[in-house]
Amino acid sequence: MFSHRCFVLFIFFLVSHSSVTSRILPRISVTTSTILDVSDSIRKTKGASSFQLNQLEEKCHTPSFSSSSFSLQLHSRASVQGNEHSDYKSLTLARLDRDSARVKSLMARLDLAVNNITKADLKPVITTMYTTEQQEIEAPLISGTTQGSGEYFTRVGIGNPAREVYMVLDTGSDVNWLQCAPCADCYHQTEPIFEPSSSSSYSTLSCDTPQCKALEVSECRNATCLYEVSYGDGSYTVGDLATETLTIGSASVDNVAVGCGHSNQGLFVGAAGLLGLGGGLLALPSQLNTTSFSYCLVDRDSDSVSTVEFGSDLSPDAVVAPLLRNHQLDTFYYLGLTGISVGGEMLQIPSSSFEVDESGGGGIIIDSGTAVTRLQTGIYNSLRDAFVKGTTDLEKAAGVAMFDTCYNLAAKTTIEVPTVAFHFPGGNMLALPAKNYMIPVDSVGTFCLAFAPTASSLAIIGNVQQQGTRVGFDLANSLIGFSTNKC
């Protein structure tokens, strides 16, 4: 059981040619242009690494938007990590590298599901674990470029007595896990590795338990359930599946199924493990028995505070879209998207472009861990060409990494750009603020269109496009709601 308390969630958001025939939307659908405050965006790039972790940790308070029984505070990673890079462009490139690795991992996971390849068919990590004796183990420092590199951190207590550790929180994952001693192969983390024998509430699960049966990959050893989570890019965590107490402030959640990982590679440098917010049975929302949750992602380059809310209703003014599921993979949250408009004109793309097909391929998911929205190449080209058509007055700049449409805005204070909007069934429409798709990539005025093409059938709405909007998941009624200015 748990009572209302807040805990600090440190969140980082990565910064995520054919001509096109279009039709004019009804006037009520969307304004044709949006103002971008260039000066403000550049100013934030110069202060992105000046915030202090200790100051933020002391600011645990009830947020202004808190209608739920369970609230977690959010901070951008930029506000807690200090100066990791020599300049903002190097920070941007690092973010985009991590984002590419995460997207590759998500798409590999879907490909496995669509092709009916189980993770048990992959590298048999389980059979090779626990090879260490009691000798001292040197934990390697992994590069941290896989699976998002732990972009979402929460400070949470593990065990009884509670030991506070940093944990990653991710909507693209289900299994909760943390690194445990004895450690056969572990990456570097901020705190000491968790020692299960020091916790009176730690209890391994047997192989016939519902939690063990809910795993994609498991094995039974000495009547204990072993788990494996692999991420499609060579990264994995392997260990015992157990129940443990999570402490959130002075509140506790008992008997949470967690993986106690003794062999972990390529994941989440600095954090002790992960809490999953996905749609599966082992994810945190399911284990908390909540039928709804929401989050609002603050500006990636600010020290603003927001929240994750469990048990809260969708706002009455929310733009509502269908929440869809994939029968092949229950982790991801699919969105009922019907179209995209640029500058008030709908892109002429097939209505089936964002639908999940019978095999489980296709569709579009909304993901808190992916930074930049990915669209199938043809759809992206249509969006880009329509956007370029409406920005002929802006000076072009060379592309940067995955971005092929960039501009030199060094001499500008504000600019007007075509409005980009997502359209949903029933005429519902979400117009994006300009800062959610025209983003700075350095501190000297280079801005790029923050969408990218993908050859995969899976499209993803990333967190750059979600910034400043509360995204609510009504799991009971299969709805997703978007509420602006509700952070």
Image (spheres, grey):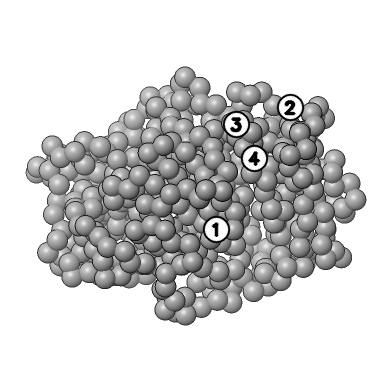
Q: Mark 4, mark 3: which one is toward the viewer?
A: 3
Q: Is residue 187 visible?
A: no
Q: Which mark is residue 348?
A: 2
Estimate how packed mark 4 is, as few (under 14), some (14 to 19) or many (20 or more) residues with alpha carbons within 10 Å: many
Q: Mark 1, mark 2: which one is toward the viewer?
A: 1
Q: Which residue is mark 3?
A: 426
Residues tagged 3 and 1 counted as in contact (Cβ below 8 A): no
- What residue is at 66 percent from the left and 23 percent from the top? 350
Image quadrant holding the N terminus, namely bottom left
Identify the secondary structure beneath mark 1.
loop
The three-letter code of the residue at mark 3 reads Gly
Which mark sits nearer the N-terminus, 1 or 2? Answer: 2
The three-letter code of the residue at mark 1 reads Lys
Residues tagged 2 and 3 counted as in contact (Cβ below 8 A): no
Q: Which residue is mark 1?
A: 486
Residue 70 sits in quarter = bottom left
What distance separates the C-alpha of mark 3 from that of mark 1? 23 Å
What distance separates the C-alpha of mark 4 from that of mark 3? 9 Å
Q: Is residue 292 visible?
A: yes
Estimate how packed mark 1 is, as few (under 14), some (14 to 19) or many (20 or more) residues with alpha carbons within 10 Å: some
What distance separates the C-alpha of mark 4 from that of mark 2? 16 Å
Q: Which residue is mark 4?
A: 429
Identify the secondary structure beneath mark 3.
helix
